[in-house]
Amino acid sequence: MEKILIAIDGSPASDEAVEFGVELAAEQNAAVIFVHVVRLLDIVPMTCFGMAAGARPHEVTEEEKQPLVEAKAAAEHQGVHVTAKLLIGDAVDEIVACADNLDVDLIVIGSRGHGDLTSALLGSVSRGVVSESKRPVVIVRERESVPLRAPART
């Protein structure tokens, strides 16, 4: 394994994917490519009553770049060769296209685990990547925080 693409969005599930993917890359002596996808357009109301809407190009903020900065620092701390790419457009399409263009060996992506109903209504980036990609995909589920011990009763 030479290249691992890790798709991130700054969520706790994404942090889990970073941890997993970086550990795997270190074990395999593989390079990591972090990708974060932001939307192409912002929808803005055109009238004072919000009846008509328009779209304008999305301006990327420093806050949107932060997940890439943090992930890159984590990988470099582990001694892993890393690059980071901010992509603009549809998350599924951009992740799959980037993986294909870079000829990666594996895609790692986090999943928030919303469940079947929510995923069906809202869509799921991880599910879309699995469906669209011809490359192996590892979905890392967000861990539930479980207290180490029960709180003391008073």
Image (cartoon, rainbow, N blue to C red):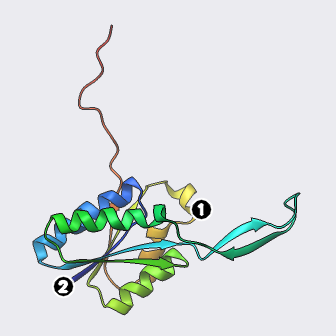
**Front-most of 61 and 11?**
61
Residue in the image at 74% along x and 66% along y: 44
Mark 2: few/some/many CA within 10 Å (<14, 14-19, 20+) = few
Q: Quarter holding the C terminus?
A: top left
Residue in the image at 71% along x and 68% along y: 43
**Residue 52 is drawn in which quadrant?**
bottom right
**Residue 102 is drawn in which quadrant?**
bottom left
The residue to which callout 1 is attached is: 122
Marks 2, 1: nearer the viewer = 2
**Residue 39 is drawn in which quadrant?**
bottom right
The residue to which callout 2 is attached is: 2
Q: Quarter holding the N terminus?
A: bottom left
Where residue 105 appears, x then y in whole percent? 26, 84
State the separation of the CA atoms marked 2 and 1.
34 Å
Secondary structure under the numbered disc 1 in the rendered image: helix
Q: In this view, does 1 lie above or below 66?
A: below
Where residue 147 appears, x then y in whole percent? 29, 32
Where residue 95 appears, x then y in whole percent? 43, 79
